[in-house]
Image (cartoon, coloured by chain):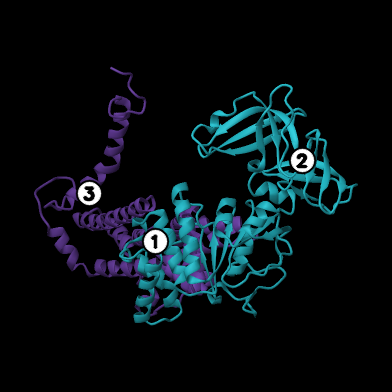
Amino acid sequence: MTKRFGPVVAVDDVSLAIAEGEFFALLGPSGCGKTTLLRMLAGFETPTKGRILIDGEDYTRTPPNRRPVNMVFQSYAVFPHMTVSENIAYGLKMDGVRAAERRERVAEALALVQLEGLGDRRPDQLSGGQRQRVALARALVKRPRVVLLDEPLSALDAKLREELRFELSRLQDRVGITFVMVTHDQDEALALATRCAVMHKGSLVQVATPADLYEFPSSRLVADFIGSVNLFEGRVRVDESDHAIIDLPEAGITAWLDHGTGASETVQIWLAIRPEKMELHKRENGAAPPVMEGTPEGYNVMPGTIADIAYLGSESVYEVRLETGKMVRVIRPNLTRWDQEDFTWDEPVWLGWHAEAAAVLLQ
Amino acid sequence: MSAPDLLDYSRRWPLRLVLASVGLFLYLPLLVLVAMSFNDSRQTTVWRGFTLDWYARLGGNLELLAALGNSLAIAALATLLSLLLGTLAAIALWRFRFPGLGLVSAAFALPIVVPEICMGVAMLIFFARILPWPAGLPWPLSLGPIVIAHVAFIFPFVAVIVRARLESFNRETEEAARDLGAGPWRALLDVVVPHLKPSLVAGALLAFTLSLDDFVITFFTAGPDTVTFPVKVYSMVRFGVTPEVNAVSTVLLVLTVALTALALRVQALAGEKLAP
């Protein structure tokens, strides 16, 4: 699909197949077109080009009220002048469901989102989390083919968000309806989705499972957007089927990889290493550098000095300055209660990573 | 003692003086008018004693009652039409982006600032030349020109009030209604209109008041058999200010003040509800 607003291309030739029962996340920074894409699925925007098929049926030009799709809005958009029950019953009323069945299904939906007994409340008597559940129940009660969620947890505070994350994924599991979520929060996408699409400037950059997105990003853009990453410019020197050797001028060292890259020796590549996959070792004058797992001596190790430490409780983040001046980020879990005292500011250290830890990025 | 605040009106005598004179010039004449309507004397300057005679006599003044009937009918019709037109105008200006939006918006607001006398003369010419209203039509139809003229200058006020209320409308709720199966009109009725309710009530009360006590525009559009309450009062005054005129004016005063107060109250309540 493509969507243009005047000269602005909001969604640029995106093709996506979402399987039944999937929890699919559209992930990207604000303005990347993910919300426009969602609104086209809901029927609030018409694609400039392309089609929307649900179960093989074309819904491209169907108005929102006649699509088997229901949306949970970012503001929840609970009707303020109706009670919780009236809110949930509204969609059924529009469908011409008779009062008796309506009551039954509303009660069912209330139980599903654990709002039993609150049916007669007014929305202004509910907390943010409860309102979100009303919005969910209102969408689910219509038994749509697809539920669309627009930043479902962004309006809630951090603690509640974490709780509802698990609840939302349990709920989706139970009802088995396809969920499509839009979010700019990578944690939310990774935690909830079975598959994610990363969008950038209206285009899809990568569609993969959360783990693949994190461990095998297809580009610097994805690697950088999902989590944090250390990127080194480099050039392949040796490329065999079972290993590769890569020069990293930025780090002043040579890297060893336990698999081939398939990259030509003439092109520039990037080596991406996640901070938690970096090891930190003490560096004493005259002592030999440590040898990394799966790596011959002298590879994947570089000297540096700790420039900054952020103690986050469960882990500590170290900013290490290499001798070339480049800063590298290392995350170290605090497995015992004294781990954070292992390293201190301005301490000379070795930085290293295993032969399988790095990802080679061609773009 | 701390230095007196410049705006602390209760302490600084010049400000108190201003306050007192405002009260004096604004309300004293009205108070005199109300008091004299209870005066047991033909003279409107000397107090003789309390009476309700003048009000009782109003009840017997058939011409005046007919004028009151005209006024109420005109106000009711003008309110209904202004509410409809004003609301639609407000929604159109809020919802649609089109070339000339600013111009149309200004055109809608123009009747608020155009001097009433100009509106009156314009309406006079309009009904004389462009849309001559047939004489001798049965009663509510004979009020046509006045109703049309009233709607023309009142509906912009309604539009302004409704437009302001729309500012606080969460458009996602309307989209939610559409998403849940409502057609465009159904969604408007089920979600937008309930949100507008306080502004519709306030707009209606204001429209009613404006229509009820309008003199200038009405004067130019009223025919001999479509005299309204304010126009009738004016013609009574021409034969001298009698206690009867005082009583009539008091009735009009109470009516408009009550309606305006109600309108303000409704709007204030809606404002409170809006800030959870």
Disc 3 from disc 1: Cα separation: 47 Å
Assess disc 1: are there few (<14), some (14-19) or many (≥20) residues with their C-alpha within 10 Å of its C-alpha: some
**Horizontal relation, residue A332 to residue B125: left or right:** right
Question: Mark 2 falls on what kind of element?
Answer: strand
Can residue A243 be seen here? The reply is yes
Pointer 3 residue:
B33
Chain of the residue under the numbered disc 2 shown in the image: A
Q: Are labels 1 and 2 on one chain? A: yes
x then y, percent, for residue B254: 24, 55
Question: Mark 1 falls on what kind of element?
Answer: loop
Q: Nearer the viewer, mark 3 or mark 1?
A: 1
Residue in the image at 68% along x and 61% along y: A207
Which label was assigned to residue B207?
none
Instruction: Supply the letter of whichever chain is cyan.
Output: A
Q: Residue A80 occupies which quadrant of the picture?
A: bottom left
User: Which amino acid type is shown beneath numbered disc 2?
Assistant: Phe
Q: Nearer the viewer, residue B77 or A126?
A: A126
User: Which amino acid type is shown beneath numbered disc 1?
Assistant: Pro
**Horizontal relation, residue B20 to residue A176: left or right:** left
User: Which amino acid type is shown beneath numbered disc 3?
Assistant: Leu
Q: Say if A39 sits above or below A151 in the image.
A: below
x then y, percent, for residue A298: 79, 35
Chain of the residue under the numbered disc 3 shown in the image: B
Q: Which of marks 1 and 2 is in front?
A: 2
Q: Say if B14 sits above or below A102 in the image.
A: above
Pointer 1 residue:
A80
Pointer 2 residue:
A232
Disc 1 from disc 2: Cα separation: 53 Å
Can residue B223 be seen here? The reply is no
The picture's colour for chain B is purple
Residue in the image at 29% along x and 56% along y: B262
